[in-house]
């Protein structure tokens, strides 16, 4: 049963999350467990207010700036909705229409877009090492501009997906699981299969599975990571997963069959990704402008993927899980659906349809996750501010 508003605030009052104030949110592993718990409680509070038609706006005016260096549907609109929930207007930076094309430096761009901006959201997930480095440079540039007196305040950053982590997605996933299992404490001991799945395309980021394996064990979930040989994730993130599992008393193991991961699982999350070594190579080829090398690598990876078409979610596999066809099936979307979006893909059409509503609900939590990140970055006393919002009871939507 979901907590009521006062119960949410009571839980929030018992957590130490002061480090979130005026701080960037770039990786979940940068944050303490209390800070992550505070994020989930704040998201629940904001959602509670909206469901009761109470405005959660803390800004009378203000600006959120987004920069997407890769395509996006769910995260782009979730950032827009999360900004709007708090009263911020959105401005999207299109690099092709900016002076970046004329050689403007990262420091200059970061400073120019920061005038009167309160939050900056960035997605940069295509090249190994590049996304995290870019976000770090933007953060340092904004901090320096503030220290130099160029900016009257420092906008905070939120990663909307980098090459290593996807914190808004994994936070939305956690919110969905908390709701489905009736509380964060009920996730402890749940068995989760985070598994590779076949895709007819290549070059998909590693950040989604990496975000999951480094977050779920922190709350006592037993994670099994499954992928064909050669489809490894970043070694340093795998080590984080092992360390978090040991710290919480959970388990983390790696296997090379989808069937082993699915067996007895309470939650299954199949998703394609490119091998870490190949993504490293791809990044170097793009940096060198080696078009022939990129084309050869793409051909090689597509051929390699094609040898693993049996890595697909079927009803037969689902039958081996803890609750059969009723086991929670998750995906960050869009999925490669066999016979629908492609000939062969990550999931059979009947399995996708069985779990479509659940996956859509999973996606619906992302605006609240992002709004909560912003709220904790911008509000010094979140509990008092949330109480004041409820007391004011300003209608979000005026109707007779």
Image: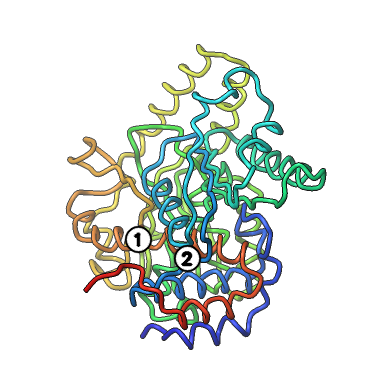
Colour pattern of the rendering: rainbow
Q: Quadrant of the C terminus?
A: bottom left
- From mark 1 to mark 2, how far is it between C-alphas? 19 Å
- Residue 52's image quarter? bottom left
Q: Which is nearer the eye, 108 or 364?
A: 108
Question: Residue 311, position in %: x, y?
Answer: 34, 46
In the image, residue 229 above or below residue 191 = above
Q: Circle 1 is placed at which residue position? A: 364
Question: Residue 127, position in %: x, y?
Answer: 57, 33
Residue found farthest to the right: 148
Residue found farthest to the front: 400
Question: Residue 223, position in %: x, y?
Answer: 50, 64
In the image, residue 362 above or below residue 289 = below
Dot 2: element: loop
Q: Earlier in the sequence, mark 1 or mark 2?
A: 2
Q: Circle 2 is placed at which residue position? A: 57
Dot 1: element: helix
Question: Which is more foreground, mark 1 or mark 2?
Answer: 2
């Amino acid at each position: 049963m979901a907590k009521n508003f006062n119960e949410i605030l009571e839980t929030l009052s018992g957590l130490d999350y002061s480090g979130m104030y005026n701080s960037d949110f770039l990786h979940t592993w940068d944050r303490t467990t209390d800070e992550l718990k505070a994020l989930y409680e704040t998201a629940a509070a904001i959602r509670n207010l909206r469901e009761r038609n109470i405005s959660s706006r803390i800004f009378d005016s203000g600006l959120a700036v987004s920069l997407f260096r890769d395509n996006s549907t769910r995260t782009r609109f979730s950032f827009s909705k999360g900004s709007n929930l708090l009263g911020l207007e959105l401005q999207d930076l299109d690099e092709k229409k900016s002076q970046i094309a004329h050689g403007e430096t990262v420091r200059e761009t970061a400073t120019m877009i920061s005038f009167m901006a309160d939050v900056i959201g960035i997605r940069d997930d295509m090249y190994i090492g590049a996304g995290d480095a870019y976000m770090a440079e933007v953060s340092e540039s904004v901090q320096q501009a503030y220290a130099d007196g160029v900016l009257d305040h420092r906008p905070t950053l939120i990663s909307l997906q980098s090459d290593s982590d996807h914190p808004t997605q994994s936070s939305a996933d956690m919110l969905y699981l908390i709701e489905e299992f009736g509380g964060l404490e009920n996730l402890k001991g749940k068995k989760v299969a985070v598994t590779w799945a076949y895709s007819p395309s290549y070059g998909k980021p590693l950040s989604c599975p990496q975000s999951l394996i480094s977050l779920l064990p922190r709350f006592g979930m037993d994670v099994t990571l499954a992928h064909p040989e050669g489809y490894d994730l970043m070694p340093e993130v795998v080590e984080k997963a092992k360390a978090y599992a040991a710290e919480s008393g959970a388990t983390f193991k790696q296997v090379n069959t989808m069937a082993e991961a699915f067996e007895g699982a309470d939650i299954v999350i199949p998703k394609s990704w490119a091998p870490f070594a190949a993504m490293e190579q791809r990044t170097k080829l793009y940096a060198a402008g080696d078009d022939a090398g990129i084309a050869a690598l793409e051909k090689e990876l597509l051929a390699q993927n094609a040898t693993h078409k049996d890595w697909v979610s079927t009803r037969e596999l689902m039958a081996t899980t803890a609750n059969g066809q009723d086991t929670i099936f998750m995906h960050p979307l869009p999925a490669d659906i066999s016979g629908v979006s492609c000939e062969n893909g990550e999931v059979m059409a009947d399995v996708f349809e069985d779990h479509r509503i659940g996956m859509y609900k999973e996606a619906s939590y992302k605006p609240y996750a992002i709004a909560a990140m912003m709220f904790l970055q911008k509000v010094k006393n979140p509990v008092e501010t949330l109480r004041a919002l409820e007391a004011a009871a300003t209608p979000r939507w005026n109707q007779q």
